[in-house]
Amino acid sequence: QVQLVESGGGLVQSGGSLRLSCATSGRTFRSPFTHYPMGWFRQVPGKEREIVTAISWNGNNTYYADSVKGRFTISRDNAKNTVYLQMNSLEPDDTAIYYCAASTLDGYEDIAPRYTYEYDYWGQGTQVTVSS
């Protein structure tokens, strides 16, 4: 069983920064957890969960939503089984619950998946609130 635990959310003023962390544990019968691509999604009430950014298992491939390009950075430390999301120049529209996700699906290892159906493990989410 795989477990994902997000942390680092909170309240910040517009223009501020936050760093989210996603600590992972567990392994499947196929390979260590560090071989899986990871993603960050966000969701606000009444809207669908949307991709923020994703990273392949080795960090060679990344994807960023247009709305966060140049402001957010995803990274991973496989030795610590942790994925990070550095968020700079935060805006009120960034307010949401942020979810960490992992994909253990076959064939996805070397890509940065961008759709919710490409992920099969999810964290509980952490609230990020940006005040104007």
Image: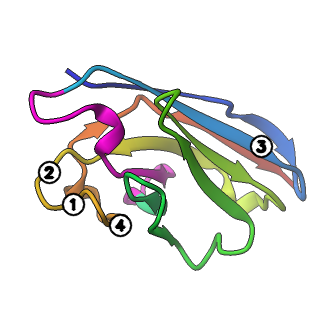
Q: Nearer the viewer, mark 3 or mark 2?
A: 2
Name the element at disc 4.
Answer: loop
**Sequence-wise, which precedes: disc 4 or disc 1?**
1
Q: In the orientation shown, which residue stands out farthest toward the bottom?
A: 66
**Sequence-wise, which precedes: disc 3 or disc 1?**
3
Residue 97, magenta (yes or no) = no
In front: 46, or 105?
105
- Residues packed near mark 3 inside 10 Å, few (<14), some (14 to 19) or many (20 plus): some
Q: Nearer the viewer, mark 3 or mark 1?
A: 1
* Distance (Cα) linking label 3 and label 1: 29 Å
The amino acid sitting under disc 3 is: Leu
- Residues packed near mark 4 inside 10 Å, few (<14), some (14 to 19) or many (20 plus): many
Q: Position of residue 57 (x, y in %)?
A: 37, 52
* Distance (Cα) linking label 1 and label 2: 6 Å
* Distance (Cα) linking label 3 and label 2: 30 Å
Q: Position of residue 33 (x, y in %)?
A: 30, 33
In front: 31, or 12?
31
* Distance (Cα) linking label 4 and label 1: 11 Å
Q: Is residue 18 left or right of residue 42?
A: right
Q: Which range is magenta?
A: 28-49
Residue 105: which numbered mark, if any?
Answer: 2
Q: Residue at x 30, y 63 (%)?
A: 110
CB within 8 Å, label 4 to label 1? no
The amino acid sitting under disc 2 is: Leu
For the N terminus, the quadrant is top left
Give the residue at mark 3.
18
Residue 25 to residue 87: above or below: above
Give the residue at mark 1.
108
Give the residue at mark 4.
114
